[in-house]
Amino acid sequence: MTPRKIRDFLNDMISSIDLTQEFIAGLTFKTFEDDQKTIFAVSRAIEIIGEASKQIPKEICEQYSAIPWKAIAGMRDKMIHHYFGVNLKILWNTVNNDLPVLKPELLKILNNLTD
């Protein structure tokens, strides 16, 4: 198996952001919190985003320091280790407010990468 590259991890993050947007399209918070399948799917996508973020080299994180890399990884850790304590309001706000802002920043990194 060939080793994964930075580009692969960024694409994982972007794809997972896109999936979260598909999962919640047309939902209100009330319908979201009552839909266990969507909660599970969104949670998994957040885990992937956080895990992929941990694979981005320190130099890139420093170069793009406006991205809250530690917070992204930290949310993943909370999702993995405290699943039953996940605050659905925070999850909802992350998907609706934070991820749409994160995606263009990740695309910027992707476009600036040289292979």
Image (spheres, rainbow, N blue to C red):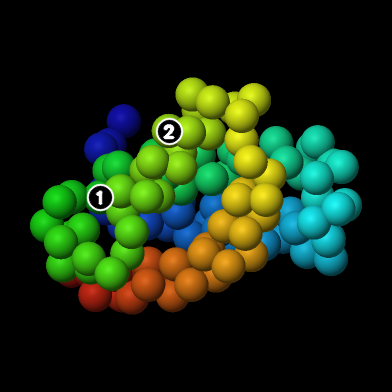
Vertical order, 40 against 82 (above or below): below
Residue at mark 1: 56
Q: Quadrant of residue 66?
A: bottom left
The quarter of the picture where the N terminus appears is top left
Q: Nearer the viewer, residue 69 or 51?
A: 69
Judged left or right of residue 55, residue 22 is right
- Rendering coords of residue 36 (x, y %): 81, 36
Q: Is residue 39 visible?
A: yes
Residue at mark 2: 77
Q: Quadrant of residue 33?
A: top right
Please give the name of the residue rendered at 53% of the width and 34% of the height, measured from the top-left corner.
79
Dot 2: element: helix
Vertical order, 6 against 39 (above or below): below
- Rendering coords of residue 2 (x, y %): 27, 36
- Rendering coords of residue 24 (x, y %): 75, 58
- Rendering coords of residue 41 (x, y %): 69, 41
Please give the name of the residue rendered at 50% of the width and 39% of the height, measured from the top-left corner.
47
Judged left or right of residue 20, residue 33 is right
Judged left or right of residue 14, residue 107 is left
Along the polypeptide, which appears first: circle 1 or circle 2?
1
Please give the name of the residue rendered at 24% of the width and 75% of the height, measured from the top-left corner.
112
Dot 1: element: loop
Vertical order, 98 against 37 (above or below): below
The quarter of the picture where the C terminus appears is bottom left
